[in-house]
């Protein structure tokens, strides 16, 4: 079995992912103390949809025209 070395950039991306993922729990707990749960969920869905649309536009993904 050969060993594969993980680059420093990959370690950095994994650390960033851990910070974002771990920070989301703190952000949700803080948000629920300040705003109603339904409003919090609506904001998360809205921002996630906006982020996904940016990715779709940048990558020029073809959107299906039929269901």
Image (tube, rainbow, N blue to C red):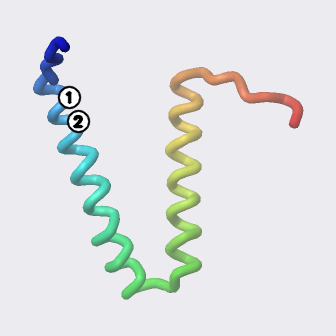
Q: Quadrant of the C terminus?
A: top right
Instruction: Relative to 29, say whether 6 is above or below.
Output: above
Label 2: few (<14), some (14–19) or many (≥20) C-alpha neighbours in 10 Å: few
**Residue 51 x, y percent position in the rendering:** 50, 44
Q: Which mark is residue 58?
A: none
**Residue 29 x, y percent position in the rendering:** 34, 78
Instruction: Relative to 25, say whether 52 is above or below.
Output: above
Q: Residue at x 63, y 23 (%)?
A: 61
Tell me the element at label 2. Answer: helix
Q: Residue at x 79, y 28 (%)?
A: 64
Q: Is residue 29 left or right of residue 19?
A: right
Q: Which residue is mark 2?
A: 13
Towards the viewer: 54 or 18: 18
Towards the viewer: 38 or 57: 38
Discs 2, 1 touching: Cβ within 8 Å? yes
Q: Which mark is residue 10?
A: 1
**Residue 60 x, y percent position in the rendering:** 60, 21
């Amino acid at each position: 079995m050969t060993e594969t070395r993980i680059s420093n950039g990959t370690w950095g991306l994994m650390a960033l992912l851990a910070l974002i993922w771990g920070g989301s729990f703190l952000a949700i707990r803080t948000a629920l103390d300040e705003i109603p749960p339904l409003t919090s969920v609506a904001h998360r869905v809205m921002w996630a949809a906006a982020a996904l649309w940016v990715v779709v536009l940048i990558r020029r993904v073809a959107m299906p025209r039929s269901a």
